[in-house]
Image (cartoon, rainbow, N blue to C red):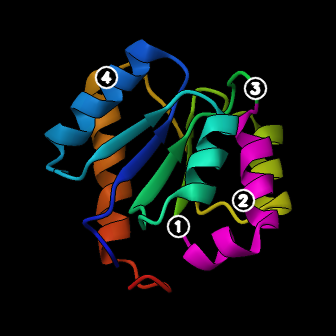
Amino acid sequence: MLNSGPIILIEDDTDDQELIGKAIREVGMSNEIIYLDNGADALQFLVTTTVQPFIILCDMNMPKMNGIELKMRIDENKELRKKSIPFVFFSTTANKMTVNLAYTKMTVQGFFEKSDQYKELVRTLKIIFDYWRESIHPNS
């Protein structure tokens, strides 16, 4: 996998952006972090960039375009699907209905609940990044 590509963090809360960014560094990830605060801007970035991202971490509830809408638009776009970018929901909205929708209506590769406890946040991010550094998929 292209482990050196940027980490795309789609999160509308600037405090959460800062905290997640700090936790990403704490787990040893030195990748560039690209912060986007809504799904519409994220989609525009993904459609226009020539960079191969390492992973997308996406919140659910955002202005302009939420995480579900964004992932559905990515899945509909042939060029973005070819990029095979790992897409993980990382959100406080982790109810059964939302999780079921994510796994049955789109090609999401993970759904993790964002903890408000920093230590737990670091632990979860470590699990996510360790998995994707080892995983074999089209970008390997």
Q: Kindly identify which numbered label has been placed on residue 64.
A: 3
Residue 78 lies in magenta, yes or no?
Answer: yes
Q: Left or right of 87: which side holds 75?
A: right
Left or right of 81: which side holds 24? left
| Mark in the foreground, 1 or 3 | 3
Q: Alpha-carbon distance for marks 4 and 3?
A: 23 Å
Above or below: residue 137 compared with residue 109: below
Residue 102 at x, y = what percent?
A: 76, 52
Q: Nearer the viewer, mark 4 or mark 3?
A: 3
Q: Which residue is mark 2?
A: 74
Span of residues in magenta: 65-85
Could you tell me which residue is drawn at 72 percent across and 52 percent down?
Answer: 71
Q: Looking at the rendering, in which quadrant would you find the N terminus?
A: bottom left
- Tag 4: amino acid: Leu
Closer to us: 139 or 40: 40
Amino acid at circle 3: Lys
Spatial CA span between label 1 and label 2:
10 Å
Pointer 1 or 2: first along the chain: 2
Side of 63 where 109 appears, left or right: left
Counting residues from the N terminus, which is met first, the one under dot 2 or under dot 3?
3
Q: Are marks 1 and 2 in contact (CB under 8 Å)?
A: yes
Residue tagged by mark 4?
19
Residue 96 in view, yes or no: yes
Mark 1 falls on what kind of element? loop
- The image position of residue 89, as x and y in percent, is 59, 45
Please tell me whether residue 86 belongs to the stretch shown in magenta.
Answer: no
Can you say whether 117 is above or below 53 in the image?
above
Q: x%, y% of residue 7?
A: 37, 51
**Which callout, 2 or 4, points at the residue further toward the start of the chain?**
4
Q: Circle 1 is placed at which residue position?
A: 85
